[in-house]
Image: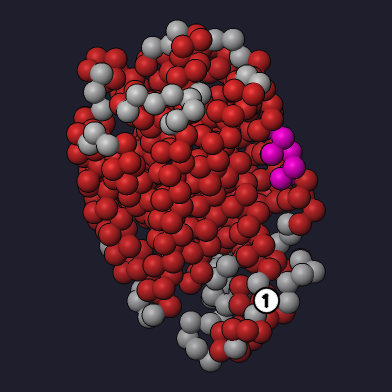
Amino acid sequence: MDAGTGTPQAAQASQGGAKVGRYRWVVVALLFAATAINYIDRQMIGVLKPTLAAEFNWSESDFAGIVFWFQLAYAIGYLSFGKVVDMFGARLGYTIAIVIWTVSHMAHGFATGVVSFAMARFGLGVGESGNFPAGIRAVTDWFPQKERAFAIGVFNAGANVGAIVTPLLVPLLVLWFDWRVAFFVTGVFGIVWLAVWWVVYRHPSEHARVTPAELAWIQQDPADPVEKIGWARLLTVRETWAYALGKFLIDPIWWFFLFWLPGYLFDRYDLDLKTFGLPLAAIYLISDVGSVAGGWLSSKLIKAGRTPNFARKVTMLICAVCVLPIWFVQGIDNVWAAVLVIGLATAAHQAFSANLYTLPSDVFPRGAVGSVVGIGGTVGAFGGMGMALFAGYILDATHSYEVLFAICASAYLVALLVVHLLSPRLAPVRI
């Protein structure tokens, strides 16, 4: 029996891959769809920023304040949902999350100013914070370690699909109806997904569609403790902070892309509601490739015999280097040349993020994964809150994105350095 497999059945399955079922990829498809809906709902405020700013006479700081309240709720909710998922599992945890975020998303259609938008965004942040803790827990339950980064990369690519769909769909809804109707129509997506999730999803050991061979493949890793581990204990572990500080450094960059990039393209290249959708969609289409490629590369390296430590960090280093050219993007006058540079950076972010998201399941026992992901998401959201306020201040004061793009370019190398210093070997944690 191979040392990397935990059971004779898993060893047999690994030798005869054709006999292993593939129902686990149906689960990934559901996670992909949820993440796409999550990002449609999340990004709409950025796509509608020029329209709403004109109607309500918002300054950059007003918009930053609305984003801030979303991220504050996201920070609070992420930590809470990590524990919810650890206690109740992915099925119920995801259900609670999507009910909260769908109701809050549709509430945007009734907003009348900064305060009411901030309240709706706060509710959205609470609900949407459950997406990744629940999704990563589902991947942890349904995939062996060697496949997790790829599975997370695939479902994380849903973020880019959502980001592609939003600038193409939402302007049409605004032109055909108005921005309020756009929130109501897109809210239906979450309702439909929830119905499918509740019917389809179960734990693999309880699922009638999972064959014995696939279950053996899923459970091939050595068993780990399933006891619940408190936050106080996790906060004393260096690997918790390796993940959390990595999130603190890179999450604000993604928030910046998501919320300010539409306005940047709108202003820098003199676009309008009818023309800025294609460049923005192209950026996130490129990002989708990065998300899948980043997970694929590290999984490929592990299957080739490299350690998870080597595979994750080499992939993250490549990604960090690919972000560097965005430092100079403001000097590019051609919109499509800028799209390529920004798209490379967003793709590298997604690939880096797919590997960073995998670290908790690499080093922590199963019963702690959701909590560690929650801690990291909360710390990352605090970083995003600071970035939102800083971006609003810088843009109001200088009307230039130069400083912001410089921060984007350097954040990933710093994040990788922090991860490596705190967890040089990515060794399994014994708590």
Residue nearest the viewer, comparing 161 with 102: 161
Question: Residue 290 vs residue 161: left or right?
Answer: left
Q: Main secondary structure of the magenta part?
A: helix
At 68% from the left and 81% from the top, the residue drawn is 213
Residue 107: quarter of image: top right
Percent coordinates x, y for residue 355 in the rendering = 41, 58
Question: Residue 39 vs residue 88: left or right?
Answer: left
Residue nearest the viewer, comparing 97 with 326: 326
Residue 136: quarter of image: bottom right
Percent coordinates x, y for residue 268 in the rendering = 30, 26
Farthest residue to the top: give it: 57
Residue nearest the viewer, comparing 392 with 51: 51
At 48% from the left and 25% from the top, the residue drawn is 273
Would you place residue 78 above or below residue 403 in this image?
below
At 37% from the left and 15% from the top, the residue drawn is 61
Region rendered in magenta: 187-194
Q: Is residue 387 visible?
A: yes
How many neighbours does mark 1 have within 10 angstroms: few (below 14), some (14-19), or many (20 or more)? some
Percent coordinates x, y for residue 282 in the rendering = 43, 44
Residue nearest the viewer, comparing 381 with 60: 60
Q: Is residue 67 visible?
A: no
Amino acid type for the residue under numbered disc 1 = Gly
Percent coordinates x, y for residue 2 in the rendering = 50, 88
Would you place residue 154 above or below residue 298 in this image?
above
The residue that mark 1 highlights is 21
Residue 376: quarter of image: top left
